[in-house]
Image (spheres, grey):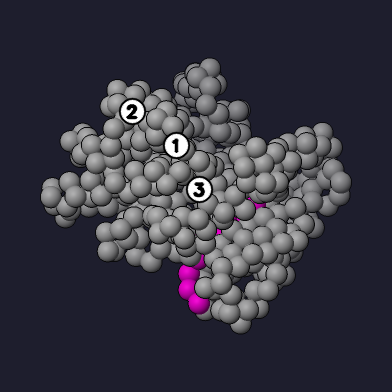
Amino acid sequence: MSLSVNPDFANAFARAGLTDAPAFLDLPGEVVSGHPDRHVCHVELPCGAFYLKRQHVVGWKERLRNWRAGFGWASRCSREADVLRELNERDLPAPRWAAFGESAGRAFLLVEEVRGGRDLRTVLSDSALTPAARRDLARRLGRAVAAVHAAGYGTPDLTAKHVLVKPNGAFALLDWQNATRGPVSEAARADALGALHASLAGASRADRARLLRAYGAVPLERIERAAAKHAKRRSVRDQLQPRAGEQRLVWLAGEAVCAVPEVAAAWPAPAIAAPFYDSPPGTIRLQIAGRDAVLVRGREFAPLGRLKARLKATPYRSAGATVGRVLFHLERYGVPAPRLLAFGQRLTGAASCEWFALYEPAPGVPVERAGELVERLHEAGCVLSDPRAALAVRAREIRIVDPLAVRVARRGRARARTARAVAELVETE
């Protein structure tokens, strides 16, 4: 177990009882970003607001990659903390680190929230931003990125969503877990600028050119080639997609329960309880927080799956966790699908687990718009593994009824199969 605390916060954290790594890892908060092996929570403490980056598993491959990059046998949280500490010391554009550490194979990094900060996409979408202010913003951002690179720090994650604009007009660049230290080559500079260029949907071509001129001498052709490459990346394409609205989740009892805030507020105590756990597998309907919902429960015995997860140093993901991921994904992109209310899993043995998924039934779409439904599924990066199980047609409406038959997939062949199957389903009804 290890813990490092920024001296600026040490007394405040001690008063709050945050004196070891498990205390930080167990901080409650709303999940604002998630991956299978880690997530980011917004945390409110008496001394201020923070973002808690929490890793569920720290594997040997990750430690080896960080060791080879010069950061020691460390987690990605420790690597990012080291970079943030140095950036803060040099007054470069980055948020302030507060604490980081490890315990029982998990790791965390606590970063102070940038109060009033808005991401670059939001700022550029503001119609009240004058042309003169846009030009000034582009020039200052170019100079800020140039200063980071000149100081010997590079990052492949320099995209619009990772650039915060403070109320005073200064910048804070986010996500440094893959940052490098040392001289930044022209190729690395062009690659970073290309990623930023590709993700700046709200900026005019002229403003992008101003940013690049303010940055300095990197051949424009090289940057544009890098931008074309980054435009194909899923993470960049996602930033250009319109979002259906803000999504929030709250973790209860570790990974055992993850729920939207209004459902989390009505969740029973203790959180691990029937009918969500310790109940027979199957599907039932119930009411929670004043909502009609569908509850799907299951049990899994997956020795090979658990072994594979252990070898890859990633958390095991049950069917319940997969459904949670898929429904959260579909809601993000406005696909008319069941609305996720909660999901969870708990390991009950060396190769067994229990899981559940709780969701509101999906709205119907006129069958005449079935093609539109398929197109929106594909735009969200999803396909139907079993169209006849996933979809139902009633009263000339088509709807997703079984999210277990939806999966995230990026292959064109899988998308084509989904489109054909949906067309056949509509024709036979």
Q: Which residue lies under the disc numbered 1?
A: 184
Q: Position of residue 112 (x, y in %)?
A: 48, 65
Q: Which residue is mark 2?
A: 223
| Residues tagged 3 and 2 counted as in contact (Cβ below 8 A) | no
- Cα separation, mark 1 vs mark 2, equals 15 Å
Closer to the chain start, of discs 1 and 2, is: 1
Label 1, residues with CA under 10 Å away: few <14, some 14-19, many ≥20 = some
Q: Quadrant of residue 237?
A: top left
Most prominent secondary structure in the magenta stretch?
strand
- Check disc 3 and report the residue beneath it: 176
The structure residue drawn at horizontal position 62% and vertical position 53%, both measured from the top left corner, is 78
Q: Looking at the image, is 22 positioned above or below residue 139? A: below
Pointers 1 and 2 in contact (CB under 8 A)?
no
Residue in the picture at 23% in, 46% down: 139
Q: Secondary structure under badge 1?
A: loop
Mark sitting earlier along the chain (3/2): 3
Camera-nearest residue between 235 and 151: 151
Q: Position of residue 61 (x, y in %)?
A: 70, 37
